[in-house]
Image (cartoon, rainbow, N blue to C red):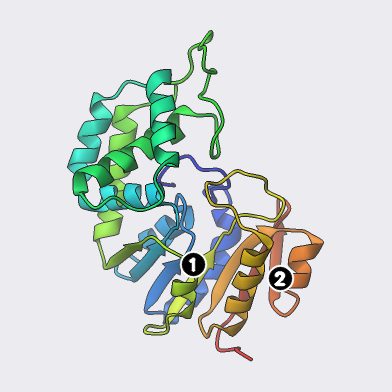
Amino acid sequence: MQLFYYFGGKHLARKHILPFLLPLLKDADEYREPLVGAGAIALSVMSRYPQMQCWINDCDAAIVALWRAVKESPDQLIRRIGEFHPNVLDFRAFSTAINAIDTLPESRTAIIELGFQLLAVATMRWSGHGGSPRGGYRQRCPRIGERWSTDWLTDKLTLICERLNAADIRITGGDFAALIEDTSRRAVIYLDPPYLHSGSNYRYDFGQADHRRLAALLRQTPHPWVLTYHDCPEVRRLYAWATIGGVYAETLVIHQPGSTAN
């Protein structure tokens, strides 16, 4: 399960990732995802450790708005879903509105609407960030609404809301560094950053400096962590000091047990 359709979401890769991650959680006070996206791994952790404190974060305001809306205002969000019928005009308008916002709105109503717009666009489009709606803009073969099921979305969001409210879940929007550097609790961190050479598939891609900064922070943190990355020579050089735990579908699982700062 993941919160919304998302380019690079890890809902199909959980069986490769969780065996590295779950053993680390037995001695942890908190689970953290600095780049949560659609949260397939976070939701899997919440289902297995429903009482564990969690801190999830993303720099994309629309993603944060959707997580906040599901946790804090599920009834209003579900009502908005029930009133909506997929169409190209709203697809364009929602996409434009999402791309124009860089900070989380202050009002609850605006947060719900921004979160709904992201959910709607992600469900109407083919996949990933950007791109056209299913069936194209002219809808000669209407497909924009083929994945839009009010009942299915309602059931999924209700279940996710229950998981988010079962324990202390912190949802923030900002830079990934805060979750890696904070040592107030014994935390386990999972990260799935934009891959090297992935193209413009996210609103906020990583530049070379971001990839290097992430590696430097992970090398110094006392927290155990698991990282998924595209298997390429640059990544293997960047994390030559860490442990390569496995490879699946050209993706590396890299990890460190923690308390190895040097």
Picture quadrant of residue 30:
bottom left
Dot 1, crowdedness within 10 Å: few (<14), some or many (≥20)?
many
Position of residue 245 in the picture relative to residue 97 (left or right): right
Q: What residue is drawn where x is 43% and y is 69%?
A: 32
Quadrant in which the C terminus appears: bottom right
| Contact flag, marks 2 and 1 (Cβ < 8 Å) | no
Kindly identify which numbered label has been placed on residue 176: 1
The residue most toward the bottom is 262
Q: What residue is drawn where x is 59% and y is 77%?
A: 218
Image vertical order of residue 114 relative to residue 250, above or below:
above
In the rendered image, residue 5, in percent from the top left (x then y), is placed at 47, 39
In the rendered image, residue 221, in percent from the top left (x then y), is placed at 54, 82
* Residue 87 in sight: no
Dot 2, crowdedness within 10 Å: few (<14), some or many (≥20)?
some
Q: Considering the numbered disc 1 on the image, is that residue within a helix, a strand or a loop?
A: loop
Image vertical order of residue 113 relative to residue 187, above or below:
above
In the rendered image, residue 2, in percent from the top left (x then y), is placed at 44, 47
Amino acid type, label 2? Ile
Picture quadrant of residue 169:
bottom left
Kindly identify which numbered label has been placed on residue 244: 2
Q: Considering the numbered disc 2 on the image, is that residue within a helix, a strand or a loop?
A: strand
Q: What residue is drawn where x is 28% and y is 48%?
A: 70
Image vertical order of residue 238 relative to residue 163, above or below:
below
Amino acid type, label 1? Phe
What whole-number distance in Å separates the C-alpha atoms at marks 2 and 1? 22 Å
Of mark 2 and mark 1, the one earlier in the sequence is: 1
